[in-house]
Image: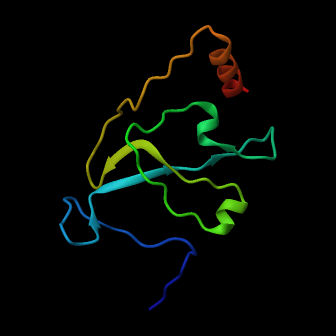
Amino acid sequence: SSAFYLPGLAPNVFCQTEVQDTKCKAKVEVFVNRLDSVESVLPYEYSYFGFCKIKDKQSSPVENLGQVLFGERIRPSPYKFNFLEDQACEKVCEQKYDDIPGDQKLLKRLMK
């Protein structure tokens, strides 16, 4: 047999319907990280651009020291999926930018 290990990653077990008192999960959690740009050497946090945010408080996964030093801030995302369940396009949220200075500044930052 052969195996490999990726530091910081633990295997997950998924099933179509969640089974109580087991590690078998039906919900696939999706997290967001940083955004890199060819314009800047520094990465941007996902929340820097005002993308869709989560509605319910969900805990962030534990980050190790290497992730923190490299600027990886792993956060929960608003995207929801169930294991082995087909899902068509679904609107996660709607973002509106008004003609006020704060919104226009955010919109220009996003377009850049």
**In this rendering, position of residue 73 left or right of residue 2:** right
Q: Position of residue 62 (x, y in %)?
A: 52, 64
Q: Position of residue 72 (x, y in %)?
A: 64, 55
Residue 2 versus residue 60 in the image, above or below: below
Q: Residue shown at 55%/72% (left/top)?
A: 8
**In this rendering, position of residue 94 left or right of residue 45:** left
Q: Residue shown at 60%/41% (left/top)?
A: 46
Residue 108 versus residue 31 in the image, above or below: above
Q: Residue shown at 81%/38% (left/top)?
A: 39
- Tell me the quarter of the image containing the C terminus: top right
Can you name the residue that lies furthest to the bottom here?
1
Q: Position of residue 102 (x, y in %)?
A: 66, 17
**In this rendering, position of residue 107 left or right of residue 75:** right
Q: In the rendered picture of this protein, how many numbered marks are placed on residues?
A: 0
> Of residues 106 and 39, which is closer to you in this image?
106
- Tell me the quarter of the image containing the N terminus: bottom left
Colour theme: rainbow
Q: Position of residue 101 (x, y in %)?
A: 68, 12
Using the rendered view, name the quadrant where residue 15 is placed: bottom left
**In this rendering, position of residue 16 left or right of residue 53:** left
Can you name the residue that lies furthest to the top here?
99
Using the rendered view, name the quadrant where residue 19 is placed: bottom left
